[in-house]
Image (cartoon, rainbow, N blue to C red):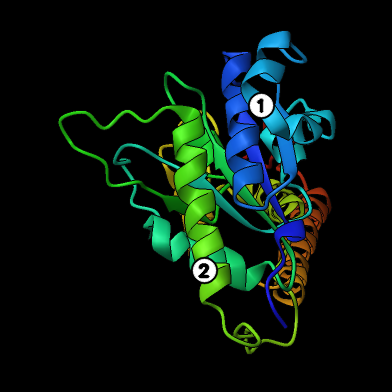
Amino acid sequence: MTGSFASVRVVLVNTSHPGNIGAAARAMKNMGLERLYLVAPREFPAPRALWRAAGAVDVLERAVVVESLAEAVADCGLVVGTSARERRIPWPLLDPRECGQRVWQESAHHEVALVFGREDRGLTNDELAQCGYHVHIPANPDYSSLNLAAAVQVLTYELRMAALAATGEAQSPDWDVPPAPAADLDLYFQHLERVLVEIGFHDPANPRQTMVRLRRLLARIRPDRMELSILRGVLTGVQNLAWRLRTAGSAQATDTPAAPRLEDRQVR
């Protein structure tokens, strides 16, 4: 089974300048991609987007506008986010060539998202935490800031090169169950945090980096749907056990005779 451009979407987050949206659409169509998602764009639709799109107006006309990154990638089995700087917590990292190869390979099996951040500051840490991989374009360190459309062009070019290099069928992952989509992973993390708070392991008032590091662990492992279902079952079992222990403790406290009042005690 070969990869599919139809399974790949480009996601632009909170884009400031509509001209960059049009230029990104043109870069996508140059490389054979047509699915554009826009997360809370500052100005869209807009004439400047149409001018910059040139012959890719059809990509803009079909663009999907959503309010959050979670909504844009909810059904994706692979989410790759662009990052221009080092993070406090290391994350699984790809270079553009590795990114193109992985995206092409996995696009044969599930939806894939390439996520690009704001022109001035990229993706937030919370947004990057929703990505299974980060991709960094190794530009000139003395002038490393890439225009948004240029970054889209680099990564979509590498994807096209990976597609052209594939001879015959693309390598099929040796796996029996598809990866868990991003929306299911988000639900799992919400469930996990509730349980950790219930059992006193995690303090929301002093979270430190506990949940971020646990997210990184799952991003590195990339559980499939069945594995994630098992993990959710484990959390439910922990909740049930904690409830039984609390209930038993309350019952024991109720059954314990009260200490006699001072006036009822025998004076010896």
* As drawn, 264 above or below 221: above
Label 2 SS: helix
Q: Quadrant of residue 141?
A: top left
Measured from the top left, where is residue 112 in percent x and y?
A: 67, 57
Label 1 SS: helix
The residue indicated by pointer 1 is 53
Residue shown at 76% from the left, 48% from the top: 74
Q: Quadrant of residue 16?
A: top right
Kind of residue at badge 1 = Ala
Measured from the top left, where is residue 149 in percent x and y?
A: 51, 32
The residue indicated by pointer 2 is 162
Furthest residue toward left: 142
Q: Is residue 107 left or right of residue 221?
A: right
Residue shown at 60% from the left, 67% from the top: 104
Residue shown at 60% from the left, 73% from the top: 105
Q: Nearer the viewer, residue 245 or 192?
A: 192
